[in-house]
Image (spheres, grey):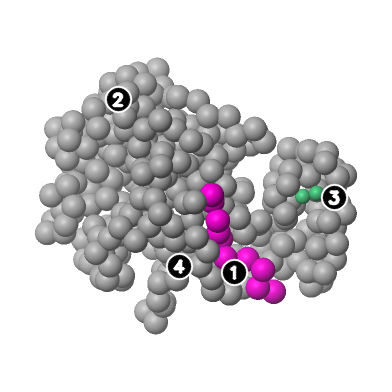
């Protein structure tokens, strides 16, 4: 089955690229954006023989990128056209889900408690915007509209219900709980990329580590302390210098690895700071790490690599009939992306069915 060889065509923004794949075993990947070549690429994360694959190419300047498992989609921010674009592995299509009036920069996504993406908007009024992916209308709201100087990147800490914002030339990492912004760290200018480990349970359950990169080529680690009334920083450590301007960071908690984009892509042991060059590009900007990617074809609606009776039960429960909107939680069953789950989906499912 090669139908979603191409994630493609968003108006004039994306052109088609193609390569066929089928991923029935959960596999870790890195995905990244390249603004100069207007492309989205990926590569298997820990296979030394792996090579980059094009996911999409086009005409814009893709920046921040995130994969949201609840939709089996990549989302990226395009700073040339001001778009937020979803590239769906379910439909094989790309869609503009938000058309803004400025330049989106960093973008992050989360599935818990609800699927959403958030991005930084750099324009006459800087802000953080959120799109609620659980609502079929994909409503977008402004979360943070004041106190930002130059927001380049952000990360959502769902455990503590905080957003960490790398505030570029304005300096430092800002932390917001939406009631207000605090600057818990010592002033470190030119922060451009941020990611975090939010859920450390050993030894201290409330001791997240925030990693950030600056325009001067250093990667830093801040240990946050939540025991006081506001988040504070226990320590800020430069774990690695000597890179180029860092535009993207992603975390692999299982392997204590940090993925770093500074044009090239590196993986870094975040304890020792040891680096390995992984992709020799001069243009990688945003990066995201996906530990459990599978793509077994249309019908694998629980994303476990097969198309079996479990999937059947979900598709049958999501059937809405032609031109009737599918129920909440059924987005992965709308294989043709027309908003319903009907006999067309059912026929596709029966062809794809592989059995348990
Ligand atoms: Ca399945
Ligand atoms: Ca239909
Ligand atoms: Ca449909």
The residue labelled by disc 1 is 5
178 lies above or below 172: above
On the image, the x and y values in percent for residue 116 come to 54, 38
Alpha carbon distance from label 4 to label 3: 32 Å
The residue labelled by disc 4 is 54
Mark positioned earlier in the residue sequence (1 or 2)? 1
Mark positioned earlier in the residue sequence (4 or 3)? 4
Alpha carbon distance from label 3 to label 1: 24 Å
Answer yes or no: is residue 154 visible.
Answer: no
Secondary-structure class at tag 4 = strand
Q: Is the residue marked 3 within 8 Å of ligand 2, measured from its CB?
A: yes
CB contact under 8 Å: marks 2 and 4: no
Answer yes or no: is residue 58 visible.
Answer: yes
Q: Nearer the viewer, residue 263 or 163?
A: 263
Residue displayed at 42% across by 64% down = 41
The residue labelled by disc 3 is 342
Q: Main secondary structure of the magenta part?
A: loop
Which quarter of the rendered picture does the C terminus lie within?
Answer: bottom right
Mark 3 burial class by Cα count in 10 Å: few <14, some 14-19, many 20+: many
Q: Quadrant of residue 54?
A: bottom left
On the image, the x and y values in percent for residue 259 come to 32, 59
Alpha carbon distance from label 1 to label 4: 10 Å
352 lies above or below 211: below
Mark 1 burial class by Cα count in 10 Å: few <14, some 14-19, many 20+: some
What's drawn in magenta, residue-wise? Answer: 1-11
87 lies above or below 306: above
């Amino acid at each position: 089955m090669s139908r979603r060889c191409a994630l493609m065509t968003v108006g004039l923004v994306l052109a088609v690229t193609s390569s066929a794949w089928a991923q029935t075993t959960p596999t870790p990947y890195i995905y990244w954006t390249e603004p100069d070549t207007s492309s989205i690429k990926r590569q298997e994360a820990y296979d030394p023989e792996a090579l980059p694959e094009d996911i999409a190419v086009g005409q814009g300047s893709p920046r921040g990128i995130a994969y949201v498992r609840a939709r089996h989609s990549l989302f990226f921010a395009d700073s040339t056209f001001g778009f937020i674009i979803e590239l769906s592995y379910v439909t094989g299509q790309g869609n503009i889900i938000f058309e803004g009036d400025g330049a989106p920069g960093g973008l992050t996504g989360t599935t818990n408690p609800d699927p959403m993406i958030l991005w930084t908007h750099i324009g006459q009024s800087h802000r953080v915007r959120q799109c609620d992916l659980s609502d079929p209308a994909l409503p977008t709201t402004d979360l943070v509209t004041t106190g930002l100087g130059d927001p380049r990147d952000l990360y959502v800490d769902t455990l503590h219900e905080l957003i960490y914002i790398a505030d570029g030339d304005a300096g430092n990492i800002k932390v917001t709980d939406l009631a207000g912004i605090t600057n818990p760290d010592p002033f470190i200018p030119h922060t451009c990329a941020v990611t975090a480990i939010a859920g450390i349970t050993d030894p201290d359950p409330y001791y997240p580590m925030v990693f950030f990169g600056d325009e001067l080529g250093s990667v830093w680690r801040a240990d946050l302390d939540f025991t006081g009334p506001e988040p504070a920083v226990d320590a800020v450590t430069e774990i690695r210098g000597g890179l180029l301007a860092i535009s993207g960071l992603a975390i692999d908690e299982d392997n204590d690895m940090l993925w770093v984009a500074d044009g090239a892509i590196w993986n870094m042991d975040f304890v020792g700071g040891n680096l390995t060059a992984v992709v020799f590009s001069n243009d990688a900007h945003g990066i995201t790490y996906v530990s459990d990617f599978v793509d077994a074809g249309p019908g694998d609606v629980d994303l476990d690599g097969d198309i079996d009776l479990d999937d059947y039960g979900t598709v049958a429960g999501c059937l809405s009939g032609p031109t009737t909107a599918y129920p909440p939680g059924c987005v992965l069953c709308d294989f043709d992306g027309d908003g319903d789950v009907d006999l067309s989906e059912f026929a596709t499912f029966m062809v794809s069915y592989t059995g348990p």
